[in-house]
Each structure stands twice: as structure tokens, then as C-alpha cells.
Image (tube, rainbow, N blue to C red):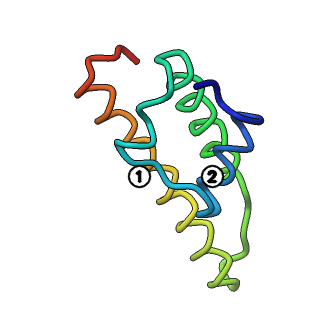
Amino acid sequence: MPISGSPKKLAQDVAEGYISFNQSNLRPYTPTDIKTILVNLAMVTREIRSEQIPLEEVMAIKMKNLRLSRLNQAEVIIRAFCRKRRIPV
């Protein structure tokens, strides 16, 4: 199943918590699609890390860390899925 829409938008939705990955909803994707998703997850992670937030804004820092955590967890799940299915990434 090809990625519906923009892969970058998919990664941004993961960061915002609208989409989460698990073993069952990764099955329809081809190895090329999975690699594309991983590349875009890394790209969005870099963009979020580059955001400069003042230290006084505690809630903004918390939201930034939460988005980074979601992206990291999605990458861990995808890499575990690839390892289980012996998909080289």
C-alpha cells in the first residue's frame, strides 16, 4: 500500500499524536515506503530539535519534548518491525 498523502505530513502527524504506528498497521507498507517514512521521521525530528524555545516557557518545552518522544517511539517501532521481518533499512 503506498503512502497516502505526503510522507512529511505523515511524520508531522506522528509528532502531533494524530497517528501512531504498531506492527499491524505497518504490514501493508513496502520496504521502500518504510524507508521513506523513516527518512521523513528523521527530517521532522531535526526540524523540531532546531526550534529555539525560551527557558521561561515550560509548557512549550514540554510539548517539544513530547513530540520528539513520539517520533523516537515511532522510529523504534518501525525498526523493530523491520528487524523482525528482515527488511534492511
Seen from the viewer's position, the closer of residues 7 and 54 is 7
Q: Say few, some or many: other residues with alpha carbon within 10 Å of mark 2 (under 14 / 14 to 19 / 20 or more).
A: few
User: Relative to the observer, which residue lies in front, 31 or 50?
Assistant: 31
Quarter in which the C terminus is drawn: top left
Percent position of residue 29, x then y: 50, 27
Q: Can you tell which mark lies on residue 49?
A: 2
Vertical comparison of 25 with 64: above or below: above
Percent of width and height locating residue 79: 35, 33
Residue lying at 69% horizontally and 50% vertically, measured from the top left: 12
Q: Residues within 10 Å of mark 1 (few under 14, many from 20)?
A: some
Say which residue label 1 marks: 73
Under mark 1, the amino acid is: Gln
Determine the residue positioned at 50% across, 58% down: 70
Rendered position, 72 above or below 28 = below
Disc number placed over residue 19 in the picture, else none: none
Label 1: which secondary element: helix
